[in-house]
Image: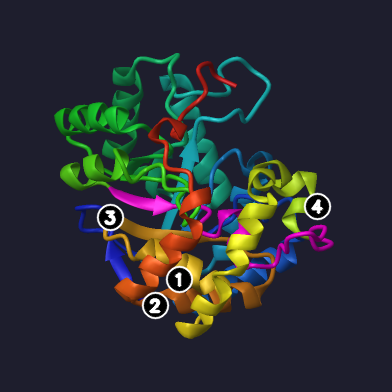
C-alpha cells in the first residue's frame, strides 16, 4: 500500500480507502462485511470511510464492530453528517443542533472516542455557513474530530468554508466528490481551487458504480445479483451509465487494461490516482477478493500514451459540467 497526505495536512491516508456506503448493514450480511474489512486491513488499507446515513446508521455500527480490537492510532476513520438520520425536522442538515447530536451518535456507533475526519455530506443552504463551521470548530477543539472535510461542495463553497476554518483555527483539509473516467466534473473548478487551498480529494465511485469494471455488456441484461438489479444497492445511481454507447466504449478499454497488466477495476482506480490532488480513492466490496483485486491499483503509474488512449475512447460520454456538483436546494 502507498500513502499520501490528505491535502496539505500532515495526515497520511492509504491511497486506497475502504468505504461501506452500499454494502454494510444492507447489501451484505455482517459476517461478509467484516470479512471485507479484515481483507482491507490485511492488504494495508488503514483509511475507512462511512457516514451516519448509510443503511440508516447501521453501516457505522457494522464498521465499529469490525474494527474493534484494532490499534486505534493505526487507523484513519472518517464519517459524515447531513442527510436524514431520523424523522424529526432537525434530524438532518448542518445546523448546530444536528451536528452536535450527530457526532455523538457516530462516535457511539463506531465505538471510538474520536474520528480522524468529520465531513459535511452536502452543503446546507438552510443553515448559515458560519453556524456550521462554528459547530465543527467546537467538535475539533473538544477532540471529537481531528480534521474537517466536505463532500460534493462547489469550489466557491469550499473557498468560503476554508476561510472561516482558518479564522476558527481548524483544519479543513478535504473534499469527497464523485470522480472517475466518466465523471470529471471537479476538474474545471473544484480541483484548481482545492490545489490552491491545500484541500485534497477523497474520491468515491472511481469505477462509476461498477460500470468501469467491464461486467456490464452492451446488448445484454445486467448480471444477476449486480448493483444494477438491486434497488436497495444503488440501481438508481448506475442507471445513467447503462447506455449502449457507454457500455460499448467501456469494453474498448479492456485491451488497454491488459496492456498495462491490470484488471478493469484496477485500471479505473489507478486512473483517478494519477491526479495529484487525489489523496485517496474509496473502494467498496461485497467479497474479500474484490478488496484484494482493487488494492493492486496502489502505486501504479499510467504512462501518458495510455492516458491519452483512455481519453480518446471515453471523451464522448464523459461528464465534465461543473454545475453537476450540487447539493439539495432544501434539506431532504
Can you tell which mark lies on residue 1? 2
Q: CA distance from mark 1 to mark 4?
A: 29 Å
Q: CA distance from mark 4 to mark 3?
A: 34 Å
Marks 1 and 3, the one that precedes in the sequence: 1
Q: Residues within 10 Å of mark 1 (few under 14, many from 20)?
A: many
Q: Which residue is mark 3?
A: 277
**Residue under the image location 50 percent in, 57 percent down:** 314
- Label 4 element class: helix
Q: CA distance from mark 3 to mark 2?
A: 18 Å
Marks 1 and 2, the one that precedes in the sequence: 2
Q: Which residue is mark 1?
A: 45
Q: CA distance from mark 1 to mark 2?
A: 7 Å
Magenta range is 200-225
Residue 238 in picture, x, y percent from top left: 66, 48
Q: Quadrant of residue 271?
A: bottom left
Q: Tell me how many marks there are.
A: 4
Side (left or right) of 154 relative to 238: left
Amino acid at each position: 500500500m502507498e500513502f499520501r497526505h490528505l491535502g496539505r495536512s500532515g495526515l497520511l491516508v492509504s491511497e486506497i480507502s475502504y468505504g461501506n456506503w452500499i454494502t454494510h448493514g444492507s447489501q451484505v450480511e455482517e459476517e461478509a462485511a467484516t470479512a471485507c474489512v479484515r481483507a482491507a486491513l490485511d492488504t494495508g488499507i488503514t483509511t475507512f470511510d462511512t457516514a451516519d446515513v448509510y443503511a440508516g446508521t447501521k453501516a457505522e455500527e457494522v464498521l465499529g464492530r469490525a474494527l474493534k480490537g484494532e490499534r486505534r492510532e493505526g487507523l484513519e476513520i472518517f464519517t459524515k453528517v447531513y442527510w436524514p438520520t431520523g424523522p424529526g425536522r432537525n434530524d438532518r442538515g448542518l445546523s448546530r443542533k444536528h451536528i452536535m447530536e450527530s457526532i455523538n451518535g457516530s462516535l457511539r456507533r463506531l465505538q471510538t472516542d474520536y474520528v480522524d475526519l468529520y465531513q459535511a455530506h452536502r452543503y446546507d443552504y438552510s443553515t448559515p455557513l458560519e453556524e456550521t463551521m462554528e459547530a465543527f470548530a467546537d467538535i475539533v477543539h473538544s477532540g471529537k474530530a481531528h480534521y474537517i472535510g466536505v463532500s460534493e461542495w462547489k469550489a466557491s463553497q469550499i473557498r468560503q468554508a476554508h476561510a472561516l476554518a482558518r479564522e476558527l483555527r481548524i483544519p479543513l483539509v478535504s473534499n469527497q466528490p464523485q470522480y472517475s473516467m466518466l465523471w470529471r466534473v471537479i476538474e474545471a473548478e473544484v480541483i484548481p481551487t482545492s490545489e490552491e487551498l491545500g484541500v485534497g480529494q477523497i474520491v468515491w465511485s472511481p469505477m462509476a458504480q461498477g460500470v468501469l469494471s467491464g461486467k456490464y455488456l452492451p446488448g445484454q441484461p445486467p448480471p444477476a445479483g449486480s448493483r444494477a438489479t438491486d434497488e436497495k444497492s444503488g440501481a438508481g445511481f448506475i442507471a445513467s451509465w447503462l447506455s449502449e454507447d457507454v457500455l460499448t466504449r467501456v469494453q474498448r478499454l479492456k485491451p488497454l487494461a491488459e496492456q498495462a497488466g491490470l484488471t478493469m477495476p484496477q485500471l479505473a482506480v489507478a486512473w483517478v490516482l494519477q491526479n495529484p490532488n487525489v489523496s485517496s480513492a474509496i473502494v467498496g466490496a461485497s467479497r474479500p477478493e474484490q478488496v484484494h483485486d482493487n488494492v493492486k491499483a496502489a502505486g501504479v503509474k499510467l504512462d501518458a500514451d495510455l492516458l491519452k488512449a483512455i481519453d480518446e475512447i471515453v471523451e464522448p460520454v464523459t461528464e465534465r459540467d461543473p454545475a453537476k456538483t450540487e447539493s439539495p436546494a432544501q434539506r431532504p
